[in-house]
Image: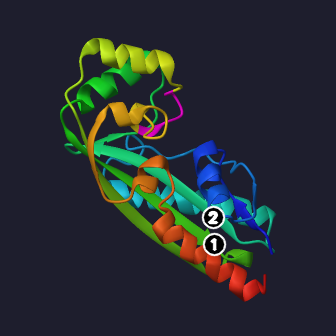
């Protein structure tokens, strides 16, 4: 019973691979909901809804396999920041985050074969950016592919140079809270007799 990762995020795949988990990747064919779609929904619940939808879409086509899905949002002073639409938006996001504390929220869902049972968690990590000069922001956007990253940055892709401190799970900021997800995967392996 091989785990399916319902994500095209190379960062999530790297985290699972580094932990020794065998898995295959299947892209979830769902449109992610945004804060604009559901402004009344709290960020953690929005991330949870997206992760559930991704897992369900993949488990329906692969009913005999467990499916792991996740969704990550960045929230700063009540404003939800998803993935930037273009480089100009990425610069605005990074400029806004400079000198501020924000929260990275990742919802993870492990849906068991058949989709009847699942484990889920919403993990929050506080991140403080140091103050950023306009040139630093421009350089970062030019050097790093920021368009597929919530909040327009990645801790593992030079994001450390923007960050003053991380309070909580660093892997959560990367996109998959391994302290939560790894025990789920290990339980699956034990039950499967691997």
The CA span between labels 2 and 1 is 6 Å
Residue at 42%, 40% (x, y): give it.
155
Q: Which mark is residue 111?
A: 1
Against 57, residue 97 (above or below) is: above
Against 92, residue 52 (above or below) is: below
Dominant SS in magenta: loop
Residue at 51%, 56% (x, y): give it.
176
Secondary structure type for disc 1 = strand
Corner quadrant of residue 115: bottom right
Residue with the mark numbered 2: 68
**Residue 9 can be seen, yes or no:** no
Label 2 crowd (10 A; few <14 / some 14-19 / many >=20): many
Q: Does the magenta stretch include residue 108?
A: no
140 sits left or right of 9 in the view: left
Q: Residue 163 appears at what percent x and percent y?
A: 30, 37
In the rendered image, the quadrant that contains the C terminus is bottom right
Q: Which residue is at the front of the view, 45 or 123?
A: 123
Q: Residue 40 appears at what percent x and percent y?
A: 30, 52
Against 89, residue 57 (above or below) is: below
Q: Residue 12 appears at what percent x and percent y?
A: 59, 51
Q: Residue 168 appears at what percent x and percent y?
A: 32, 59
Question: Which numbered disc, 2 or 1, marks the residue closer to the eye?
Answer: 2
Secondary structure type for disc 2 = strand
> Which residues are drawn in magenta?
146-150
143 sits left or right of 12 in the view: left
Residue at 40%, 47% (x, y): give it.
73
**Residue 33 can be seen, yes or no:** yes
In the rendered image, the quadrant that contains the N terminus is bottom right
Label 1 crowd (10 A; few <14 / some 14-19 / many >=20): many
Disc 2 to disc 1: CB gap under 8 Å: yes
Q: Which of disc 1 and disc 2 is earlier in sequence? A: 2
Q: Which residue is at the front of the view, 113 or 3?
A: 3
């Amino acid at each position: 019973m091989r785990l399916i990762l319902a994500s095209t995020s190379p960062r999530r795949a790297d985290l699972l691979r580094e932990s020794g988990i065998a898995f295959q990747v299947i892209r979830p064919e769902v449109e992610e909901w945004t804060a604009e779609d559901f402004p009344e929904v709290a960020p953690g619940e929005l991330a949870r809804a997206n992760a559930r939808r991704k897992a369900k879409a993949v488990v329906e086509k692969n009913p005999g396999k467990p499916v792991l899905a996740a969704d990550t949002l960045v929230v700063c002073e009540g404003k939800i920041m998803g993935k930037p639409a273009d480089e100009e938006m990425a610069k605005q996001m990074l400029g806004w985050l400079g000198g501020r504390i924000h929260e990275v929220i990742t919802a993870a869902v492990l849906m068991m074969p058949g989709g009847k049972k699942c484990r889920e968690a919403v993990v929050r990590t506080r991140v403080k950016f140091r103050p950023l000069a306009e040139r630093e922001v421009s350089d970062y956007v030019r050097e790093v592919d920021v368009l597929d990253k919530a909040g327009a940055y990645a801790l593992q892709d030079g994001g450390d140079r923007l960050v003053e401190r991380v309070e909580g799970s660093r892997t959560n900021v990367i996109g998959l809270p391994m302290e939560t997800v790894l025990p789920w995967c290990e339980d699956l392996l034990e039950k499967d007799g691997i």
